[in-house]
Image (cartoon, rainbow, N blue to C red):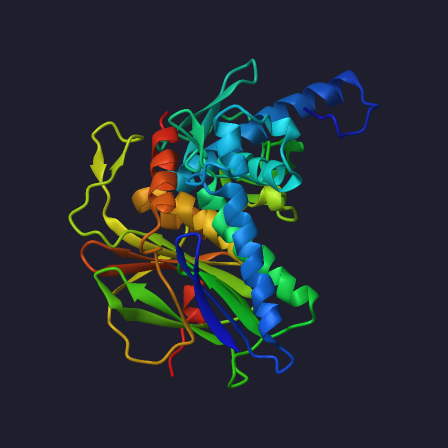
Amino acid sequence: MKQTRILMGMPVTVEVVDPAVTEPVLDAVYAYFEYIDEKFSTYKETSEISKINRHELALEDASEDMRTIFALSEQTRLETEGYFDIFYNGRYDPSGLVKGWAIFQAAELLREKGFQNYYVEAGGDIQLAGSNAQGRDWRVGIRNPFEMNEIVKVLSATDCGIATSGTYVRGQHIYNPKNAGALELDILSLTVIGPDIYEADRFATAAFAMGKKGLGFIARLDGFEGYSIDKDRRATFTAGFGRFVAYD
Amino acid sequence: MNKRNSPTFDLNQSARKFFLSAFVVTAFAAYVAHDRLGTQASTLTTNSAGQSNTQTSGASLAGSFKNGTFTGTEEDAYYGLVKVQTTIQNGKITDVTFLEFPKDRRTSQRINSYAVPTLQQEAMQAQSASVNVISGATLTSQAFVASLQAALSSAKN
């Protein structure tokens, strides 16, 4: 059973291969995403994060999920040389961390219900488990940043997370303030394979912000592989990435 | 330093440990610098106070260190404990290995390998094979852009 719904402003797809799956199971997964959106959306005035940003709610009095996200954000900031930070313009926006975390938790929901073969994908970030309908590892395409309807790599993977950070807007100039000369971004897409989607997503986001040195950062992490595409249509990837590439 | 070492030691042993640990920490720094910058192997000089500094010239070691294998102290690298072992031959570092490095906790995933990453390249090529699912940057997410900008702006020195 496979469904796609728009949640958190992006398409969310859930496919469960196990025959025991029913519609209410998928409903529960989507309900979880709705719960996350209600709590963490900075676009919703009623969300808990908006209340924190308006100083109506202190972090100490916030929900456990909120405090967890803040703790994980701080941990990620420290682990990424400050490249990942949810505090910007006097406000907190943990969206960059919440997505991967929500996908991971949604997939855990399926696992706890006894399902073994599924994936949960939101906005191009994926948690994989078990096998696909053909009984093989999941086949995951990497989108072409120059041509949205094309894929440029096919991966074969399971029981891991795959996240891509990037931009499809050509001609857009993104500047890295860490470089005094305001460097134009020349990495368009960075895909990270990690032990789960929470880990893959947070490091993909941070490494993308690092520009050219981002892939080297990923290469230094144990259990992570990366694949980047630059403005000259050149792909650069880590040494262990090849074992995830599908050649058939 | 030395917090985790045996609490009983005589003065000589203590001093020796201090010099050795100072040396190993410097060796560690030199090794990292060498690895990251991709320069020629750094060599070390030392003064009588045991303070070491690195040089990237080809000068040999100032003769203060004997050949052999030396183990450093456990050091808190804030993401975990690090302990290195170095081998000296003819006054030069020939090897640095990590006896202990963070690897088992989530908080330890920042950096646990100091090797220069091996990266490979190829020309990007469109594929026609069928897939189950596609990974790509979120197409419409303003949150991503906001988050990226937040990351970039907070990445200032």
Residue furthest out toward the bottom: A134
Identify which residue, A84 or B1, lies in the foreground: A84
Residue B92 seen in this snapshot: no
The residue nearer to you, when weighing A95 against A76, is A95
Query: What residue occupies the far left of the structure in this picture?
Result: A171
Q: How many marks?
A: 0
Q: In the shown orientation, is residue B38 left or right of residue A147?
A: right
Camera-nearest residue between A192 and B13: A192
The residue depicted at 57 percent of the width and 58 percent of the height is A31
The quadrant holding residue B49 is: top right
Above or below, comparing residue A18 to residue A223 in the picture: below
What residue is rendered at 49% in x and 56% in y? A224
Q: Classify residue A174 as left or right of residue B39.
A: left
Q: Measured along the vertical axis of the image, is residue A34 above or below residue B19?
A: below
Q: Residue A57, how many percent across, how many down?
A: 58, 27
Give above or below for A5 relative to A65: below
Residue A65, quarter of the rendered image: top right
Q: Provide residue A122's location: percent of width, then percent of height.
A: 45, 59
Question: Left or right: where does residue B24 sit relative to residue A167?
Answer: right
